[in-house]
Every structure is written in C-alpha cells, then in structure tokens.
Image (cartoon, rainbow, N blue to C red):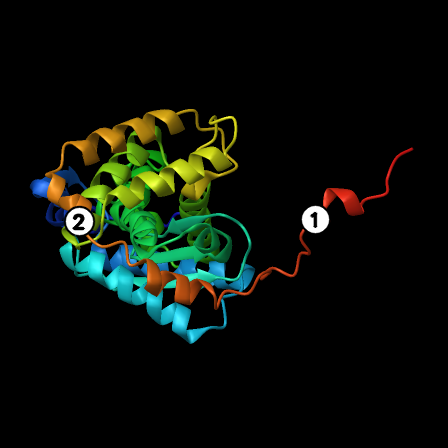
Amino acid sequence: MIPRIGPTGVTALLISILFSACVTTGPGGEKSFILISDADEANLGKQVDSEVRKENKVLPDTAWQAYVNEVGGRIVKVCDRPNLDYQFHVIASDQVNAFALPGGHVYFYAGLLRLMDNESEMAAVMAHEISHVVARHSVKSLQATYGGVIGLQLLLGNKSEGAAGQLAGAVLGTAMSGYSRSHELEADKFGVYYMQQAGYNPNAALTMFDKLGKLTGDKKRGFFENLSASHPDTPVRIEKVQAQVAAMPRSVDTLPLYEDRYQKMKKRLPLVVSGVEPPPAPDSTKQGK
Ligand SMILES: [Zn+2]
C-alpha cells in the first residue's frame, strides 16, 4: 500500500517536517510539535466532512446554520488559530452531542441545542470544540497512532482510496468517540477562556456542564464527543471549570447570556428531527400483567 520512497523523497519530507513542526496550539503562545501542515489538515477535514454528510442529515434551516456560524465566528476571532476556514453545522439528530474535525468543521446535534437555554451555553460548547481544533488534538492523536513521522507523511501523500479511508476513519473515530483525558481538560480550559474573551458569560459553561453531567447519570461518562464512551472524569471537569470561572474577575458575571436571542432560535427547532418517535408516556403503556 505504501509507495516506495527514494532518498530525495526522504529529504523533501524531512524539510517539510522541519517547517511544519513547532506551532502555536493554545492561549499565551503555547507551542506543540505538529507534523501535519494546515493545508493537509484542511484536506483531511474536508474529506471526513463528506463522510459525515453521507451518514447524517444537516438541519434544513438556513437561519440555524447562519446562527451557529455567527456565534462560532465570534469565538474564532479571539482564538489562537483564527486563519482556518471554520464551518459550523447543525445535524438533524436528537442525539445530545457535538464534535469537531481537524481543519475546522464543527457539528452540533439538534438534541444538544434543545438542551441549552441561552447563547452563552452554546458558546461554551462551541469554544470547547474550537479549542480541540486550535490545540490540534485530532492531529496529535494521529501522530501518536501513526507514530512514525514518515508513515504519517506517506499516508497523507498517498492518494489511494485505502490509505485515505484509513486516515479518515481514524480521524472520525477520535472526533466522535472522544479524546484523551488531558485533551478534554485542555479543551475545557481553553474554551472557557475563549468564550469569555469573545464576550460571553463564562458562568454559562458551568450551567451547561452541569446539565450534561446530570444527563450522563452515573457521572462515569464524558460529554460532547463521547457521550457513550467510558470516561470517568466528568466531576473533575466540572470542578476544574468551576475553579477557573471563580478565579476570573467578578466583572465576568455581568457579561450577557443572550437568552432571548437563543430562545427565539430554539423555538424553530423541530421537536423530533431524527424521525424516531419519543418513547410513550409511562401511563400509556399497557404492558405486563
Ligand atoms: Zn471535547
């Protein structure tokens, strides 16, 4: 599958690696060793986006699509990686979930939007997802999976369907089934910082996290990308965000939640979007006895 590579090819690879290596991946100029160029990352994201669209239906409401792009754009402006072509999408599904792809595609499920009560809560989830992109968490986990720099560069350069599918599958797996514990904590931390920088009330991150924490019930499951995965640190995540918001100047408490704006949009969401009927009310079931 992997093509042979001559000495000149190796030199070219090493040169491109040196130039794409050390990049800013967080607030305060935080740097990481990154081996995939922005262009390769964008291509990979585009490819996985088309897979996501094959499997999922986008909500056919241009007002909602415009709304998520407006709120997302506000956070992108203050983030540490504003130059990507970010695109925000609403998926017509009742799942409570959101995820981001490398290159800047961010997806919100209608089920999650329905759980929110104001725009700042949406901004909290959005800033968390944007932070995964800024910190290049997908890229880092690809680097870890394919370890060898050369192997990864070859896969990226390999236009065969097998290699492309292998990479796309790995990316989608990480984006949808959850990142490592440290990556989640990092996205939470950056996210709360970015949302506040964008003028959103960071207390909304707490109300949002609290709702998601309760939803996961036993608190043994994570939220956002990995609702179904075993992820035992939800209480830790909530505690850390509480501490972060508590350490901010109290002027943040007066930042707007944009409740009216959000409620107006929320009314536009269909009650059921995935075609699955809600379970019947308990008193209407006549089973047993
Ligand atoms: Zn996350």
Look at the picture and state if 263 lies above or below 247. below
User: Which one is nearer the viewer's eye here, 95 or 114?
Assistant: 114
Nearest the camera: 279 or 54? 279
The image shows residue 86, relative to residue 6, as above or below, that is below
Q: Residue furthest right?
A: 289
CA neighbours of label 2 inside 10 A, class few (<14), some (14 to 19), many (20+): few
Q: Nearer the viewer, residue 93 or 139?
A: 93
Left or right of 258 in this view: 193:
left
Q: Is residue 5 visible?
A: no
Decide: few, some or many residues near mark 1? Use Cα within 10 Å; few <14, some 14-19, many ≥20: few
- Sequence-wise first label, 2 or 1: 2
Q: Which residue sits furthest left?
A: 29
Residue matched to label 2: 254
- The kind of secondary structure element at disc 1 is loop
Query: Real-space Cα distance between discs 2 and 1?
Result: 40 Å
Residue 14 versus residue 41 in the image, above or below: above
Nearer to us in this view, 164 or 32:
32
